Amino acid sequence: MKTKKKPKKKTTSELTKLRKKIVQLQKAEKKLKKLAQEFQHRSEDLNLISALNSAVNRGDDLPKILDLFGKETGKILSCDGVTAYLLSEDGKYLVLQKYDRLQERIDRISKSARIEIPGEIKIYLNKNSLYRKILVGRKPKLINNVKQAQKLISEFTYGTSLKKHLPKLYKLLGIQSVISVPLIAGDKVIGLLDISRKKPFTESEIKRLTIISKEITTIFSHFEMRISLRRNEELIQKFVDAATEGFVLFDSEFNIIAVNDYILKIFEVTRNETIGRNLIDASPGAWETGRYQQYENVVKTGIPYAEDDVIVPEEYGSKHLAIKAFKVGDGLGMILRDITRQKMIENNLRSTNERLEYLIASTSAVIYASRPRGDYGAIFVSDNVSQMLGYETDQFLENPSFWIDHVHPKDTERIMRDIKNIYKNKYHSYEYRFRCKDGSYIWLRDEMKLVEDEDGKPLEIIGILTDITYRKKNTKK
């Protein structure tokens, strides 16, 4: 029988080599595990970022996106709470952005501690604020110190009744570790993210959150821009609605797509009754009067068109409007001003003037208005002056000294002295001789009244000239 050969004993050098190989394999395995873990983390982070982007593209609002962020971050980082803040416009405080999961947590804390938590939570960034230091530093901050974590919590209670409940809050929250990441868009700090839990965070988790926070920053910037745009739109709408003129916007088919409050008020209609109506329906007379064709020409050429007096249909009260139409995009914009009252005043004034002109033409007295100081030159003289004195009205108006130059020389000094009494009594009258165009003198009775403004400043003198020559002659007899 053949005897088995005994295995050779490994030499010391061979054992050393084997041990080194085992160590190398262990290191390689450890490295592979680390790479696999990093790959898994990276995959989780990318999935989260992808989910957030999808939510933005769907048009989800900020609370819904934050709810998604809190849920997914809670899974991948095993954290208790995710909170996001936006910096106020003046940079004086951070405003907590609420979402469903966070609100549920706040409600549970409020119920358990039997304390009332404010609807809006602000963190005021005073000089001792830890949050302020984090924002100024512009770098993520890892806090694995319980006291510092509690200091962060205490900043929520600044200036509120919650301050006296801090011990309860510390106990209920149980936060021992926090990562705070400033959200920076370009050179501007726009907010901050807080991730908290009981188990201490690691440096690798800070790196993960820093990467994720960049995406949150983009989302916040997007919503900040949207909020700013909405705020500007609201301001523009408030401005347009407060305007003392009407604004109407038509699309390319001349359907109304926007109006301001002025339009709704003067036509006594609602916005729902107005939006969508066609110009022809809203203003039937536009076609018959040719205005519709003018509006078409505005859209075609871009040249504005204005109408001084447009009478609207009787169903709106037969109002008078001044209209200006101009091109807006591929549609039409229109500014409307209610001039009904102005037209009424003009018509009344026209009627008054016609009555006055008739009365003046029917009487022998001359009506005039003159400057209240200086040369007292005439600024208005009724046409019948030519019948009384032989002169045309233009001769009085063009030459300020025409009146005083034709007063009898023996009366000039007296009337220029006495006319100043009008400032004291607001009324004055005197009699004097006046040279007519044919060279003869007649006696005039001049009765005048001083017209003043609201502040008592003289505006003009109005008066009546009456021929009293016949009475003067009879008096002498």
Image (cartoon, rainbow, N blue to C red):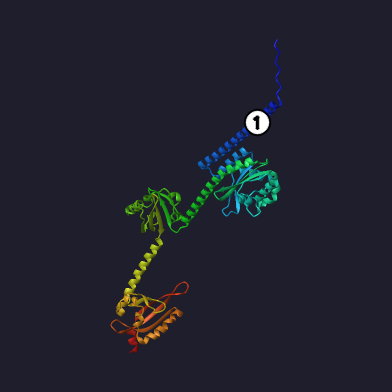
Q: Is residue 114 visible?
A: no
Q: Is residue 75 left or right of residue 357?
A: right
Residue 217 pos. (x, y %): 56, 46
Q: Amino acid at mark 1?
A: Gln
Residue extending furthest toward the left: 438
Question: Can you say whether 447 is above or below 56 in the image?
Answer: below
Q: How many marks?
A: 1
**173 or 133, nearer to the observer:** 133
User: Is 325 or 453 nearer to us in this picture?
Assistant: 325
Among the 4 quarters of the image, the one containing residue 414 = bottom left
Residue carrying label 1: 24
Looking at the image, residue 359 sits to the left or right of residue 423; the answer is left
Q: Residue at x 35, y 67 (%)?
A: 351
Question: How would you rate the neighbour count of disc 1 (Cα within 10 Å): few for under 14, some for 14-19, many for 20 or more?
Answer: few
The quarter of the rendered structure image containing the C terminus is bottom left
Residue that lies at the very extreme toward the bottom in this rendered image: 477
The answer to whether residue 417 is above or below residue 368 is below
Viewer can see residue 207: yes
Residue 362 at what x, y percent from top left?
32, 74
- Quadrant holding the N terminus: top right
What secondary structure is found at the residue carrying circle 1?
helix
Residue 396 on image: x %, y %: 34, 77
Q: In the image, is 392 to the left or to the right of 319? A: left
